Image (spheres, rainbow, N blue to C red):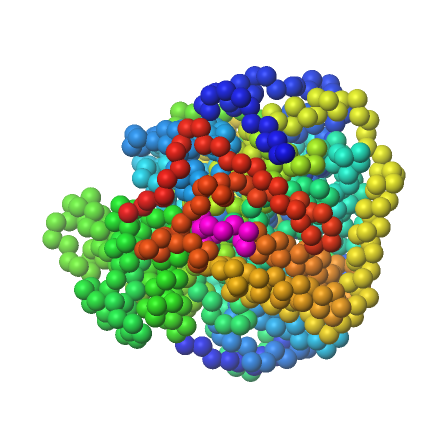
Amino acid sequence: MINNRIPAGELAQKWSTYKSTCKLVNPANKRSIDIIVVGTGLAGASAAATLAELGYNVKTFCFQDSGRRAHSIAAQGGINAAKNYQNDGDSVYRLFYDTIKGGDYRAREANVHRLAEVSGNIIDQCVAQGVPFAREYGGLLSNRSFGGTQVQRTFYAAGQTGQQLLLGAYSAQMRQVSIGAIKEYNRHEMLDVVVIDGKARGIIARNLVTGEIERHGAHAVLLCTGGYGNVFFLSTNAMGSNVTAAWKAHKKGAYFGNPCFTQIHPTCIPVSGDHQSKLTLMSESLRNDGRIWVPKKQGDSRKAYDIPEEERDYYLERRYPAFGNLVPRDVASRAAKERCDAGYGVGTSKMAVYLDFASAIERYGKIEATKQGIHNASKEEIIKMGKGVVKEKYGNLFDMYAKITGEDPYSIPMRIYPAVHYTMGGLWVDYELMTSVPGLYALGEANFSDHGANRLGASALMQGLADGYFVIPYTIGNYLADEIRTPKIDTKQKAFDDAEKIVKDRIAHFMNVKGTKSVDYFHKALGKIMWDKCGMARNAAGLKQAIQEIRTLREEFWKDVRVPGTADSLNPELDKAGRVADFLELGELMCIDALNREESCGGHFREEHQTEDGEALRNDENFMYVACWENIGNNEWQLNKEDLVYDVIHPSQRNYK
Amino acid sequence: MEHTTINLNLKVWRQKNAEDKGQFENYKAENISTEMSFLEMFDVLNEKLINEGQDPVAFDHDCREGICGMCSMHINGRAHGPWSGTTTCQLHMRAFKDGETITVEPWRAKAFPVLKDLTVDRSAFDRIQQAGGYVSVNTGNAQDGNALPIDKKNADASFDAAMCIGCGACVAACKNSSAMLFTSAKVSQYALLPQGQPERTTRVMNMVAQMDKEGFGACTNTGACEAECPKEISISNIARLNREYLNAQLSL
């Protein structure tokens, strides 16, 4: 029986009731409690800073050379908050509702409502830290729209919102480092969780510069280690993003929730060749102003601007008139795939669609001309002014596109195609963000909790910071209040010996195989299996085949991988080998989960389950649950179910038409 | 975009660890697509080295979209290579000609010791930030975001400074290995905002003191930092830092 520990009472009162009744740890006791935070992205940095401010002793770990490098930094478009500054009808309830609906009714009501409740506090906190959000001429905060909503609730800092929010959280973290409340362990990778008498009591980490294996004890461990999109090899994730910390936790008893829920983002720069190492996102905010289209004629090889207006198919506006280009990500991605598969794709690979700013440039140009009092502006002048406005809004994204593709997006439409971006699945957590291992928490993208089967744009930053700034500081106290008599964790205990031995044996194995193929060879092979058979569209036959292929590949990996260098020095190939070994296990579980979920919902699209017009067809009767996978041995899993109960919202078929 | 393949000669700095003296090694990179990024070209080289049983070249990189600040190569004598306003990960092979020889070194600065090959230790930047690169506001203390209107001009200028990715190119480009552009960008971000005012004096004093302690040199006033900065952070931030520092000293 899964206990999600959702408090009783009215939905809107649950969090405030929880906060006023949860157990507290007094300041003197906090000083003798140690907390480990793994990962320094938005969730990790905000949690570490806030817990240190409260008086706990915090240790942070990240594999990068500085906490500021975590991949939250690459988030572009914005962060949602139910401030209703635009007076356009927004409210906590509406943000809650949009998020539940956007997630295709596979998220927990109580968690999502709490998220919407604290969303406004996040903006306030970030402003207070000196995060330079975009502002209007009157000096107030600016907003824009994002997919899946009909209000303007997204706060942003040009196309670098993630960077500015992370640097804000990092600055708060650095402040605590300077007073000794946080001790940083950069260029360190967590390689196991140490569990003693059923509770998380520390970690084993490897110093990536010296190769030294270290033991760290703590009263609680927080995993803020992001998502696992790199299981596909090609994704918008950073090269180092990995599942290892979460996977080790899973092996130590933490359930993995909905692993097959993957977000394929519709607007990424298409793959250009076999050398490709990663994919680059073009922010969803571009869909505010860009119009997506393909030629009406199959295989049309004319240049974009030689195709007249009436021979273009603005397929999102055609299929979804109410939301148009701003449909949620899963819907937009599938629609692009559908057009390309049917032979309407553009570019040399024919696996791309156009994202066109011509009409936005003209519209903004006209507004600008009016503003400047020029009533007889020529078309060229209008376009020049319009380009200026678009540059101010999206300049850095356009520059990035130009550098990568060698094309000028101000004069010819961008070519885009969907790519793996975010994973809604992750470690299962209860309402308090605790995994099924007591004392072990998962925050941000690393947990499964708030986005259901599809995350709306500008909600990841919101969730990461909500978990770190405003949720964990309360919920962790409820656990630690019973730990005040636990002395400092002694890392000489047998559980640490055992965990360390497993870690060391595994590293020795990698170094000793001396096989014939590089780590990347296996990673790319795994990625191809996952993308082809567990990607944007899935079916039972393909998934079954994928499971077999992954098992074979995994066996080959352990026998034939080649890791050069030594284990006692900086060795990026060794780091990668450990991460890919875990991806090779996770990939199988993702396929098992996708095979089990005999329905389509959000980003999970089973070809066998679709409506007549190709939309996702849910099966609420049989699948309205969180799949909580329990590791029961060597790549064997047992399915536990947490039923999703909707007290307030009545699930219906998502309609963006 | 049309793409072709090119062959290149690489002259790459190899250094086993911080104690090793290090030396250049020559490699051939063949059949490199002009669509590749510079780091993807290094991926190809490393794959080849691994298959030949050699040690691949260690280099820092992570996001590969120009924002994390982790990549750090000195290419043909320029931090992040020939394209201005571009990080190494966003530099593409279109920038090079068939048959060209490319020299690749790590950042060279006393305060950035080499860890291995092209990887350096930039933790000095973290310590400069720890010295005062923050607003002292605990979580939960904030007032409503719109209770504090901020002149758009100042907010935009603050953002322009805050765009710094902390890669260290400014230090690598400077003859004196000065960290003035990095430090001034952080000082400016806060100096331009009302939130930064209460700690304005101590911030600049402490951050500059830490910068000196780390062994970064003095500003040369030649602007190499601005020219090589992948985010085009303006040198006017250094002028602002100098003003802030002077005012802070006068107010003591």
Q: Measuring 84% from the left and 50% from the top, which residue is drawn there?
A: A501
Asked if the magenta segment contains residue A602, the reply would be: yes
**In the depicted view, which residue is nearer to us: A204 or B57?**
A204
Q: Quadrant of residue A22?
A: top right
Spot occupied by residue B6 in the image (x, y as percentages of width and height): 53, 80
Residue A289 appears in the figure: no
A289 relative to A122 in the view: left or right: left
A28 relative to B2 in the view: left or right: right
Q: Quadrant of residue B24?
A: bottom right
B153 relative to A171 in the view: left or right: left
Image position of A252 with respect to A347: above or below: above
**In the depicted view, which residue is nearer to us: A364 or A263?**
A263
Residue A567 appears in the figure: yes
Q: Measuring 31% from the left and 39% from the top, which residue is drawn there?
A: A150
Q: Measuring 36% from the left and 53% from the top, which residue is drawn there?
A: A611
Spot occupied by residue B115 in the image (x, y as percentages of width and height): 73, 58
Spot occupied by residue B104 in the image (x, y as percentages of width and height): 63, 69
Main secondary structure type of the part rendered in magenta = loop
Quadrant assignment for the C terminus of chain B:
top right
Quadrant assignment for the N terminus of chain B:
bottom left
Image position of A552 with respect to B247: above or below: below
Spot occupied by residue B66 in the image (x, y as percentages of width and height): 52, 56
Image position of A564 with respect to A156: above or below: below
User: Which stretch is magenta?
Assistant: A594-605
Q: Measuring 26% from the left and 71% from the top, which residue is drawn there?
A: A297
Furthest residue in direction front, as rendered: A621
Asked if the magenta segment contains residue A620, the reply would be: no
* Number of dots carrying numbers: 0
